[in-house]
Image: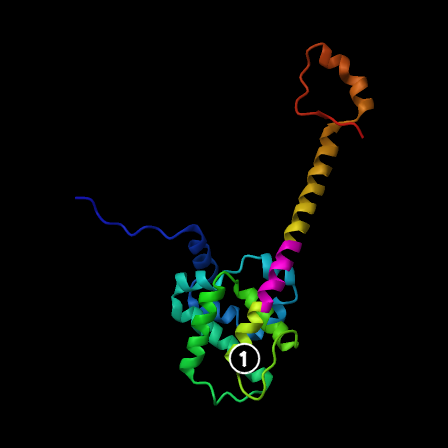
Amino acid sequence: MQSLQKPSPPSWQQEILAAYKTGENLLCLFSPDNQSRYCQSLERCLIGKAPSIARVSRTFGSHIAESWLEIQLLDLAEFSGVRKDGVTEKEYEDIARIIISGYGDFKLTEFMVFFQRFKQGLYGTFYGVFDPMVITRSLREFRADREKLLRFYEDKKRQEEKKREWERSRTTSLTFEEWEELKWLFNMGYERKGLEFTNY
């Protein structure tokens, strides 16, 4: 009789478990207290290895992902000096679920950039009370900014790769003059062994 084995988790999940061990560790590492420190490198926040909120939910459970967002939202409300008495704990949970369902592909560090920029006044404003609609509208604006930034960093990465490739080919290729000096060797049957001709 064949034993039923639990399938091993996908590689991305294994990486998350290896890096953070528990959901509680993850909550501490990505707490609002560390927001400014993480946001010092915008590029790393956007293209680094931090997990997405959906992957956090699948790895440690939806309660951890929702708790993480609720902590960020409460921190934002406190920073903004708005009245929190109008929003119940259940409403914070609902907002967190709505955000996860609409922005599950956002990394935790990307959310941190969003909350940091919101605090800087780059997105919506609360008028006396914490308004979930201000958050969801602002996230829509942030998504457009994020896409532009991701394109910028992808282009930058491609340019850097091209430059590295060009540098590599420059050191392993022959100039026309070098080729002229050595072609008699190739005519005698010697192999080029990876050397390439380039005309500068």
Q: Quadrant of the C terminus?
A: top right
The residue indicated by pointer 1 is 75
Q: Residue furthest right?
A: 177
Q: Quadrant of residue 138?
A: bottom right
Q: Residues within 10 Å of mark 1 (few under 14, many from 20)?
A: some
**Residue visible at 74% across and 13% down?**
185
- In terms of depth relative to the viewer, which is nearer, 178 or 58? 58
Q: Quadrant of the N terminus?
A: top left
Q: Residue furthest top?
A: 188
Horizontal side, residue 26 vs residue 127: left or right:
left
**Residue visible at 67% across and 43% down?**
161
**Residue visible at 68% across and 20% down?**
192
Q: Main structural element of the magenta stretch: helix, strand or loop?
A: helix
x and y, in percent, of residue 14 in the image: 42, 54
- 171 up-or-down from 2: above or below: above
Horizontal side, residue 74 vs residue 193: left or right:
left
- 80 up-or-down from 5: above or below: below
For the image, the number of numbered tags is 1
Secondary structure of the residue carrying numbered label 1? helix
- In terms of depth relative to the viewer, which is nearer, 50 or 69? 69
Q: Amino acid at mark 1?
A: Asp
- In terms of depth relative to the viewer, which is nearer, 195 or 130? 130
**Residue range of the region highlighted in magenta in the rendering:** 141-152
Horizontal side, residue 83 vs residue 187: left or right:
left
x and y, in percent, of residue 179 in the image: 78, 21
Whether residue 47 appears in magenta in the rendering, the answer is no
Q: How is the image coloured?
A: rainbow
x and y, in percent, of residue 32 in the image: 55, 74
Whether residue 142 appears in magenta in the rendering, the answer is yes
x and y, in percent, of residue 29 in the image: 52, 68
